[in-house]
Image (cartoon, rainbow, N blue to C red):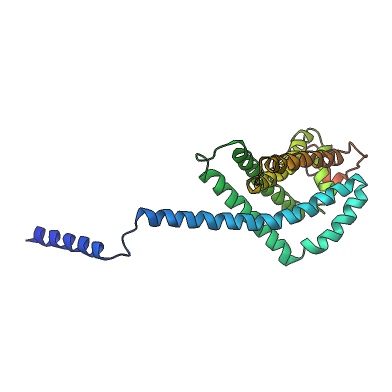
Amino acid sequence: MRATRIFILIEEKHRIRERSPSTAVSPNENEDSTEIFYMTLRTLHRTSAILITAFAIVHLANHLASLSSVASHITFMEVARGIYRQPAIEVLLLFCVAIQVVSGLRLVVSAWTQRRGRIAWLQAIAGAYLGFFLLAHVSAILFGRTVFNLDTNFYFAAAGFHVHPYQFFFAPYYFFAVLALFTHLGCALYWQAKSNVARKLAITLPILLGSVIALLIVLSLAGSLKPVEVPEKYKAIYPGGK
């Protein structure tokens, strides 16, 4: 009798599940949910990218000002900081960085096996490096400000170039960061272009421009264009820099 009752209860549960539309999820519904998730993720990625790109343009212009002199770089930075270091704007930028890193990593990994073609892989590799750079660079800036109590200006970025052997890390670190930014943007423009000529220009011009800007910034930080005297307090953050 007890076994019969258990069997009846199990049968009743199955009938309830069959009647209830909320408990049955079709494969199509799962696919729709996944597609909506990735559409939302891409929208967040692109929206945050617009704000980060706007900041990056100002930041790169700031570094290019050092081609004139370090004083010009610092003067430019002080003016720009009056805007982007407003608490609300700084929090928004940090939030956008977090979205870029998390969403970018998820998009790269999720489409790893479906990715086809050189441009798709170039975009993914450039995006992955940008994610690494943003995470490392922003962390270093915040660490320098809060732990070392340093003004994270030109000298903070340049210090690693002037303490051996760290220049062998920082030269490619900065060069490929700038190049990855322009490459990633060029790939995004490539997908929007309508003709083959427009597509070639969309990917080639940003890469060439990014390479030139990256080289100029690295040479400036290294003091190869004009002599740079980095204060000892900045060098001291590196082992052997005192």
Viewport quadrant of the C terminus: top right
List x then y, in percent, for residue 25. 34, 58
For the point 58% across and 51% down, which residue is it?
Answer: 102
Total labels: the figure holds: 0
Q: Residue furthest left?
A: 1
- Residue 213 visible? The answer is yes
- Quadrant hosting residue 33: bottom left
For the point 58% across and 36% down, which residue is it?
Answer: 117
Looking at the picture, tell me which residue is in the foreground, 142 or 24.
24
Looking at the picture, tell me which residue is in the foreground, 19 or 133.
19
- Residue 147 visible? The answer is no
- Quadrant hosting residue 190: top right
List x then y, in percent, for residue 120. 60, 40
Identify whether 109 is placed above or below 33.
Answer: above
List x then y, in percent, for residue 196. 66, 40
Q: Viewed as shown, does residue 67 lie left or right of 100?
A: right
Looking at the picture, tell me which residue is in the foreground, 44 or 240.
44
For the point 88% across and 49% down, which residue is it?
Answer: 65
For the point 81% across and 60% down, which residue is it?
Answer: 81
Q: Viewed as shown, does residue 182 lie left or right of 5?
A: right
Viewport quadrant of the N terminus: bottom left
List x then y, in percent, for residue 66. 89, 47
